[in-house]
Amino acid sequence: MSDQPASDQPAVGPPARLANRLTLPELLDGYHEPAGRLFLLPTRGPGASTDPAGDALAALAHAHALAEAVLRWRWIHVRHALAGGATLDTVADAMGLTVGEVRVGFTRWADDQLRLHQLSDRTHAQLLGLLDRR
């Protein structure tokens, strides 16, 4: 038996597993609930965490899983933005990245999709062509 308090949190596991298993609202709740209890910890009032380590681990795992789940779609959003007429500069600004970083990331994503047979050669070339439009 451990001297540590038993956590009332379910085992959280690696963020990638959570991101693949939970919906975005579930990930947000999985972050918000323990983070809220930690926020109340200094007050020791009602709702304050009784398991700071467990709550902190749950909040960390869910926060990272949420970020991973959201960022998983970033290059698809870039594809739609560019195909819809956005410039590479505006896409980079929206992402908080440089144009070069967007160019490299989008190219890697498109190359990976081609390698995984998710894109045809023609579609791959069309996607890369979006990077050269003005």
Image (spheres, rainbow, N blue to C red):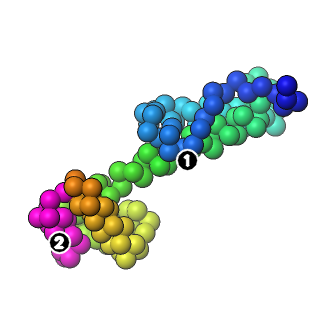
Query: What residue is disc 1 on?
Result: 64
Read off the magenta span. Answer: 119-134
Query: What residue is disc 2 on?
Result: 129
Q: Find the residue positioned furthest to the left.
A: 122
Q: Residue at x 42, y 47 (%)?
A: 70
SS of the residue under disc 1: helix
Q: Residue at x 22, y 55 (%)?
A: 117
Q: Residue at x 66, y 33 (%)?
A: 34
- Label count reads 2
Three-letter code for the amino acid on which mark 2 is drawn = Gly
Q: Residue at x 19, y 57 (%)?
A: 119
Q: Position of residue 19 (x, y in %)?
A: 47, 41
Rendering quarter of residue 56: top right
Q: Could you tell me what secondary structure mostly forms the magenta stretch?
A: helix
Q: Is residue 27 above or below residue 70?
A: above
**Residue 44 disc label:** none
Q: Position of residue 18 (x, y in %)?
A: 51, 38
Pick whichever, 84 or 124, lies toward us.
124
Q: Position of residue 74 (x, y in %)?
A: 36, 55
Judge whether residue 120 is colored magenta: yes
Three-letter code for the amino acid on which mark 1 is drawn = His
Question: Does the image show residue 120?
Answer: yes
Q: Is residue 58 left or right of residue 112?
A: right
